[in-house]
């Protein structure tokens, strides 16, 4: 072959088949974490059926339940529709057009993700108390959740090879027909995935609907739990809610699977030529400005206003500091426990295949489908029955955080472990290390930055958690979120404002650090 | 050289799930201290074999022995950390969180500090990177990373080193140099080595012994020269180099009649009346059209490589043009008439 300068093409990498089971040092703690995550779901089912299926059915088939179902679904449909319009339009404008300041707009439009729904509700209610009800709830939820559609759609738009659209144009299709026949069908999986996330958010939201006094499942469960000693109705309602959210999560997983299949090629060869907006430019700018104004500027402005008008007399600085400190403490404990539980599951999910590994990972994701209020209820029932000393004590609240946010930490750990090539671990084994030594000396040190980022993210979501904290906090303890909720509910907006401000500031620090870490 | 480090792989089979088996009774013996290349197209099972020998995968059947130690066999599966087998993966896979010296010392667990230091320095010197111990992996070039990976694998004095397409990621200008350095470092330590590759040029130029793997079995195992000059069948002939394959009929004791005329056979035809005659392009010469002992043909294409050129010529009686490697100045152009003559002996395959 001396005469040929043949460049050997690299053979495709062998799929790594997990021949060996995960080592016990991972398997045992991962099973503990999975059982822990499934505990609320299992207990909820037991509890709801305790008085016999007939009683549970009576609650479920009750006219009030059907009424709640209609209200929850109505709100969900309205918010999802609004989010699709906002999300797709903003994604297209910022990714594919010559919109002035497109990058800045796309960053600004994702900021609402950092605003908890109850802060948005606080902002609108304090400006216009008449908004309470369906309209206010839909408005507040839309403005905090449309980025769930915008982000995946923008990513999909960036991922479409412009050569496809150019091919369509060369085959005689105009820009609009090209968009409808080539671009839009490829955006469907991303938009559907985003829409399902929004639906999940709306169904499990408690903060906005309760402040807006719009009865959905979550609010009804809370009321029913508070109002009566018989907790079976609350449990039965929870089961209905959980069934709905589980169905949504399953649907979302399905669309994600399909989206992966639909993609051909690995990415874009080059960016698309931006679409010249022409005379629509002003209108497009106005649209972006309006969305950012109502979703970002308005809540911040309202907050600033209430901070300014609230005389320092209403500022209980000591109470504020104490609440902030307590919030940091529980959030840190929650993030710590969640990260420790997530570590073995994340490593197994990244490194091992097979049915067992998949089951473990899916079990850990249970919290993704469980609204905070149902997890809290399940833990209350469990503690009252089997672990009374824990009832209304901090450890129970920490456990609720771990169940709820295990998916966040597992996803971060899994991604962090996937970053380093598995061959590193093979090399370490060949150099004489036992599996647990490989974990300690190679896998964990390499994944540490990503795991830490996941811990920071978990810390932020723990800090913002409302419904489970309301039910499980020890008597007399407040977090920033619960205090903000109580004050807003009582209409004392000036008193609520400092809590909202401190919450946003504290949550912004880890988010800022995470952003820096990523870039 | 003692036989403690000879590798014996016998009857290896492996399938993933219910699919087609990827290994179907693979046999391979590598004498102690030799460098063997396992050569095959992608998907032939060579990487699976390597992972079984290293202990990352369990074979369905078969045994792996290093010297007289049984590593894998019925009911036996020594974990990778107890096999004393070093691996050099594609792209090196250095631990990015450890310095070069700590990468090399990673496998030196039993030794004390000064011994570790001594061996590390010795290994770095062996691969030509003395003084690089304090660098971090990302500060090294691809070729340097590959050398550190070799030093890391050799440091614990393994009996066997497995190299999994280690030169793939290097650009071709660098490859030859790193390849030669790797070979001399392996020689210096006396370790047995198995190099997995799909690049026949790399296998022929680097290894003492080449095993061609096809469909999960070793199709032929021979020295590079034997493999190139006496391939076991036409497929191997074409896989390890350019081949001219012509149908031929046996004529007398040691000659075959082909479209290129009568060609002497290297070995007696063994009862064969007809078969495929194998020649290498460098065994063909361009001649004048009416020269003695040559057949006439038409030049169809010329590919010029600098050090030599490949001229393809259509000859009567054979429907695909034959390749002729021409060293030195080139005087033919496509479309021209030429003569073709065979030099040396040919192989005959059924």
Image (cartoon, coloured by chain):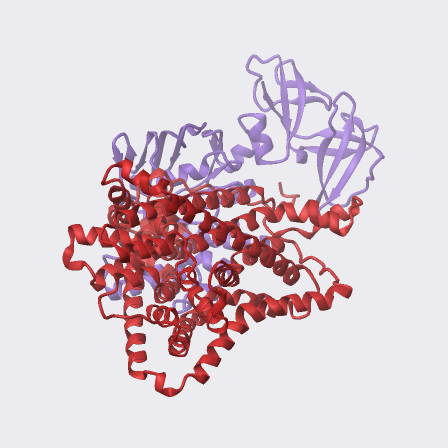
Q: Is residue A341 above or below residue B221?
A: below
Residue drawn where x is 32% and y is 60% of the image: B105
Q: Is residue B337 above or below residue B350?
A: below
A305 or A389: nearer the eye? Answer: A305
B37 or A421: nearer the eye? Answer: A421
Could you say where residue A46 lies in the image, as x and y percent from the top left? Answer: 25, 42
Task: Give the purple chain's letter.
Answer: B
Q: Quadrant of residue B152?
A: bottom left
Quadrant, the C terminus of chain B: top right
Q: Quadrant of residue A502?
A: bottom left
Residue drawn where x is 62% and y is 54% of the image: A157
B116 or A317: nearer the eye? Answer: A317
For the question of whether residue B86 can be seen, the reply is no
For the question of whether residue A361 can be seen, the reply is yes
Q: Quadrant of residue B156?
A: bottom left
Could you say where residue A478 lies in the image, as x and y percent from the top left? Answer: 28, 70
Q: Is residue A422 above or below residue A57?
A: below
Task: Give the red chain's letter.
Answer: A
Horizontal side, residue B21 vs residue B332: left or right: left
Horizontal side, residue A198 vs residue A51: left or right: right
Quadrant, the N terminus of chain B: top left
């Amino acid at each position: 072959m001396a005469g040929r300068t043949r460049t050997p093409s690299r053979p495709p990498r062998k799929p790594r088949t997990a021949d060996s089971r995960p080592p016990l040092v991972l398997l045992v703690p991962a099973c503990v974490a999975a059982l822990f995550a499934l505990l609320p779901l299992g207990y909820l089912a037991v509890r709801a059926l305790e008085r016999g299926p007939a009683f549970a059915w009576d609650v479920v088939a009750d006219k009030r339940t059907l009424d709640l179902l209609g209200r929850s679904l109505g709100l969900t449909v309205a918010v999802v529709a609004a989010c699709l319009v906002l999300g797709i339009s903003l994604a297209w404008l910022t990714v594919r057009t010559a919109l002035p300041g497109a990058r800045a707009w796309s960053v600004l439009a994702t900021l609402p993700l950092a605003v908890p729904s109850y802060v948005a509700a606080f902002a609108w209610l304090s400006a216009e108390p008449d908004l309470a009800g369906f309209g206010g709830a839909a408005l507040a939820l839309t403005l905090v959740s449309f980025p769930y559609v915008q982000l995946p759609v923008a990513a999909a738009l960036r991922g479409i090879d412009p050569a496809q659209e150019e091919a369509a144009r060369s085959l005689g299709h105009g820009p609009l027909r090209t968009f409808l026949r080539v671009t839009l069908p490829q955006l469907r999986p991303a938009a559907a995935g985003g829409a399902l996330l929004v639906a999940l958010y709306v169904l499990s939201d408690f903060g906005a609907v309760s402040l807006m006094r719009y009865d959905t499942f979550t609010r009804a469960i809370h009321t029913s739990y508070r109002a009566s000693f018989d907790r079976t109705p609350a449990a039965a309602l929870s089961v209905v809610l959980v069934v709905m959210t589980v169905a949504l999560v399953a649907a979302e997983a399905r669309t994600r699977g399909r989206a992966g299949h639909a993609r051909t090629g690995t990415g874009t060869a080059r960016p698309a030529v931006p679409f010249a907006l022409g005379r629509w430019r002003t209108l497009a700018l106005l649209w972006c400005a309006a969305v950012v104004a109502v979703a970002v500027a308005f809540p911040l402005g309202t907050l600033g206003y209430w901070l300014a008008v609230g005389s320092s007399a209403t500022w209980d600085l000591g109470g504020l500091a104490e609440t902030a400190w307590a919030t940091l403490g529980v959030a840190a404990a929650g993030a710590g426990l969640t990260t420790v539980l997530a570590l073995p599951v994340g490593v197994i999910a990244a490194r091992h295949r097979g049915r067992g590994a998949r089951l473990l990972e899916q079990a850990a994701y249970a919290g993704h489908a469980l609204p905070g209020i149902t997890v809290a209820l399940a833990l209350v029932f469990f503690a009252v029955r089997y672990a009374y000393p824990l009832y209304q004590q901090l450890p129970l609240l920490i456990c609720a955080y771990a169940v709820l946010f295990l998916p966040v930490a597992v996803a971060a750990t899994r991604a962090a472990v996937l970053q380093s090539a598995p061959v590193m671990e093979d090399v370490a084994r060949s150099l004489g290390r036992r599996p647990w030594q490989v974990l300690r000396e190679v896998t964990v040190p390499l994944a540490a930055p990503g795991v830490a980022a996941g811990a920071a993210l978990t810390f932020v979501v723990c800090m913002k958690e409302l419904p489970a904290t309301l039910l499980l906090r020890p008597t007399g303890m407040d977090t920033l979120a619960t205090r903000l909720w109580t004050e807003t509910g009582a209409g004392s907006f000036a008193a609520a404002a400092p809590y909202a401000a401190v919450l946003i500031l504290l949550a912004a620090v880890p988010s800022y650090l995470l952003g820096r870490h990523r870039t | 050289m003692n036989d403690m480090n000879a590798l014996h792989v016998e009857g290896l089979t492996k399938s993933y799930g219910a699919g087609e088996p990827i290994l179907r009774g693979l046999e391979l013996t590598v004498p102690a201290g030799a460098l063997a290349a396992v050569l095959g197209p992608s998907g032939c099972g060579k990487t699976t074999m390597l992972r079984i020998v290293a202990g990352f995968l369990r074979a369905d059947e078969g045994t792996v022995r290093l010297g007289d130690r049984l590593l894998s066999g019925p009911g036996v599966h020594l974990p990778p950390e107890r096999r004393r087998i070093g691996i050099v993966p594609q792209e090196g896979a250095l631990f990015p969180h450890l310095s070069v010296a700590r990468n090399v010392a990673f496998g030196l667990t039993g030794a004390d500090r000064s011994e570790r230091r001594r061996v590390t320095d010795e290994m770095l010197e062996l691969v030509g990177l003395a003084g690089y111990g304090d660098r971090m992996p990302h500060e090294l070039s691809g070729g340097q990373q590959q050398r550190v990976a070799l030093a890391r694998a050799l440091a614990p004095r393994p009996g066997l080193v497995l190299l999994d397409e280690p030169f793939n990621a290097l650009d071709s200008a660098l490859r030859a140099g790193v390849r030669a350095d790797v070979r001399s470092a392996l020689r210096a330590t006396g370790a047995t080595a198995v190099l997995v590759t799909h690049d026949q040029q790399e296998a022929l130029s680097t290894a003492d012994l080449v095993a061609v793997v096809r469909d999960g079995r070793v199709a032929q195992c021979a020295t590079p020269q034997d493999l190139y000059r006496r391939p076991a069948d036409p497929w191997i002939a074409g896989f390890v180099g350019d081949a001219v394959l012509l149908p031929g009929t046996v004529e007398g004791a040691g000659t075959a009649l082909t479209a290129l005329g009568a060609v002497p056979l290297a070995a007696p035809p063994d009862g064969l009346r007809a078969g495929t005659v194998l020649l290498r392009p460098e065994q063909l010469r361009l001649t004048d059209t009416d020269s003695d002992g040559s057949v006439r043909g038409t030049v169809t294409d010329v590919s010029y490589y600098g050090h030599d050129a490949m001229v393809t010529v259509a000859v009567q009686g054979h429907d695909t043009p034959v390749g002729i490697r021409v060293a030195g100045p080139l005087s033919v152009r496509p479309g021209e008439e030429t003569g073709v003559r065979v030099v040396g002996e040919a192989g005959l395959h059924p």
